[in-house]
Each structure stands twice: as C-alpha cells, then as structure tokens.
Image (tube, rainbow, N blue to C red):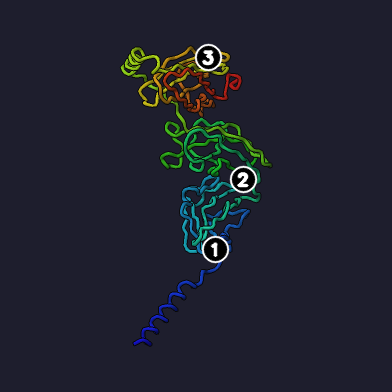
Amino acid sequence: MMLRLLKYVALGFCSACAVQNAPQGGPKDETPPVIREISPVIGALNYTGSTATVVFDEYIQAQKLRGVLVSSPPLTGLEFELKGKRLSFTWDENQMTDSTTYRISLGDEVGDLNENNRIKNLQFVWSTGPIIDSLQYHGSLNKKGEGAFDALSVWLVPSGIDSVSKAVFSTTPRKDGSFSFYYMPSDTFDLLVFEDLNFNKTWDVDMEPFGFQKNIFSLPDSFHTIIDYSALDFEIPILDSIVQDSIAYYIDTASEESLGTISFRIGPHEKMLHLWCTHSSNHQYLMTSSAHSDTLLSEPIILPPGDYTISGYQDLNENHVWDGPSWEDGTEGEPILESQVFDLKANWDIEQPIVLPLKTAEDEN
C-alpha cells in the first residue's frame, strides 16, 4: 500500500513539473506580410484590365478595408475578395480613361492573420497610357468640433464646378489630420473635406459639415497647406421669456451677498460680435452684442452664482444671422467662438476676458 501511494505522489509531482516547464514558444511575430505577387505591378503602363491581385507570404486579414478603400480616379463597382493569402479586386469594365494614372489605396488595413501586423500604405498604381503621373499634393486639416480625422473624406474635384457629385481624386486623412495625394497630373483642382454621415459615399451639402479650398495645384515637391474644417454649426439660443422673468425676479429679491458681479473684457475687433452667456442649469441666457470696437469692458452685470459658458460668433456681414460656409459662393463660415467656461461665486466681483476668433475684417479683404 505504501509503495502504491508513493508511486501516485511521484506521478503527480512529475505532472506538475511538466506544466510549469512547458515550452513558451518563440519571439512574438512583429513583421508584416511580404508581397510575393502583385498584378498589375506598381507603375505598370498601358494597363486596361478590370482586375488587380496581390498575394502574400502568409495568411492575411483586412477587417475594415471597405471603410478605407479608395480609388483615384474613382472606379465604379470596385469590390474585393480575400481568400487565405490572396486579395483580389474587380471593377466595372471599359470605364477607364485613356492615358490616365490610376491608384487603389488600401491604407494600413491589411495585416497578417495572427498578430495583424499592418502593411503601411499598400496600393496599386498603373497607367492606361505610356506615362505615370508623378505630381503630388499634401495638406492637413485644422479641425474644430468633435470627431476623428479618419472619419472624414477629402476630395479633389474639377476646379470651378458649382455642384459636386464625385471626386477626381479622393483619400482619407491620417489620424493626425494630414493627408496626401500622389500620382497626380499637372492640373488645378478644388478641394472638399466632409463627413459622410449617411455613408452613401457622396457629399450631401444640406446635411453634412464641410470645409474647402479652391484652386489646388498639383506640384512636384512636398509643399504643404492647411485646410480649415469645422464640424460645428452655431445655433442661436432661444430665450424663454418666462424663465428670463423668473431669473430677473430672483435677482431682484435675492440678497446682495448671494449674487455675483461680472464684467466682460472683449479684445479689439473690426466686425460685430454676438455673444451668449449660459448658466449651467440651461435655464438662463444673457445675450450681449458689440459693434466695431477696440478693447471693450462691458458694464457690470449681476448674475446668480454658478458655472457659465460663453458662446457666440463673429458677424462678418453684420446681418445678425450666423452664415455657414458656401461652396457655391466660395465663402467660409463666419468664425465661431470656442466655448469658454467660467465660475461665478456668491459675493464675487470678477472681470472675465473673452478670447475672440482669429479672423478679422482684415482677413476678409
């Protein structure tokens, strides 16, 4: 009996040792897949087919490829199929233009199956004629408002058109807001950046925020420009007369020690400003408006204590309405103040500076 028990203990001990000393495998794979075959080859000339294929040295994945896949100029009916190590593309036949350089960009979305090590800037490039266009354009977005840069679309369209339906070249900004166009012909374009809110792969001017810059030139070097884009629309607060009366009554009946006093210091400006002061309860608005002025200190205002937010816009055409950007007129939206928050406590007497938009009347001229 004792010998049998010792045998079981020995077996159990050896089993535990085997688990603790199991092999841990080799080093982590940090190498992206390697291209073994690609057709058409990068820089192919006189290619007029309707398929493209790339084969890698290992199994791949591309979970978000459909969201980043871009062809410039656009290829109608562009679809892809992923099988094992092969990624294939097809598009509608007989649509490519003669003597034109085409590019299919896959972004950074193709990676190996196990670790998803990404291939950077994977693309197909070919020409239907004897020459590959080699000019380029680089820029970055100066974005206001929420949302990720890589949720936006950047289009180059023929210069001077009033109605935008499709792009000649298109791309998606990188996560830092920068973007690039390569393999461009010598030409002039208008640039549009917008958020495709309804995912219909086109720009709906009445519902999707946008920014633009007209007369973009393709260049042989790395010239870089900054494009303004705002996801913001300015909505003028609606003043509730009943609430306003109740606030006025509260101020009239409250003790002086339970209220605060504030003056607003507004910097020099050439055009009218419309400003709103909103209490954190969302029940009280105070509107102020100032015309052309040097540095201005408002009259002291008595308000209930609490957190306040200043909002407003610069009324460049002084029509008392916020005007958004207009592609047709070639005008940008009137500058919106960044939200500015301050705290007013009971029995305080403070002077609050207001940071104005950078644009002035001089910028418009």
Q: Nearer the viewer, mark 3 or mark 2?
A: 3
Q: Are marks 3 and 1 in contact (CB under 8 Å)?
A: no
For the residue labelled by badge 2, is the local secondary structure a helix, a strand or a loop?
strand
Which residue in the rendered view is the most extreme toward the front?
A: 2
Decide if residue 59 is on the left or right side of residue 222: left
Amino acid type indicated by mark 2: Tyr
Q: Is residue 79 left or right of residue 156?
A: left
Helix, strand or loop at mark 1: loop
Give neighbour class at mark 3: few <14, some 14-19, many 20+ (Cα, 10 Å).
some
Q: Position of residue 160 (x, y in %)?
A: 56, 31
Q: Residues within 10 Å of mark 2 (few under 14, many from 20)?
A: some
| Residue bearing mark 2 | 182
Specify which label sits upstream in the sequence, 2 or 1.
1
Mark whose residue sits in front, 3 or 1: 3
- Point out the frontmost of discs 2 and 1: 1
Residue 28, numbered label: 1
- In the image, taking residue 4 as reference, residue 88 lies left or right, namely right
Report the amino acid beneath label 3: Leu
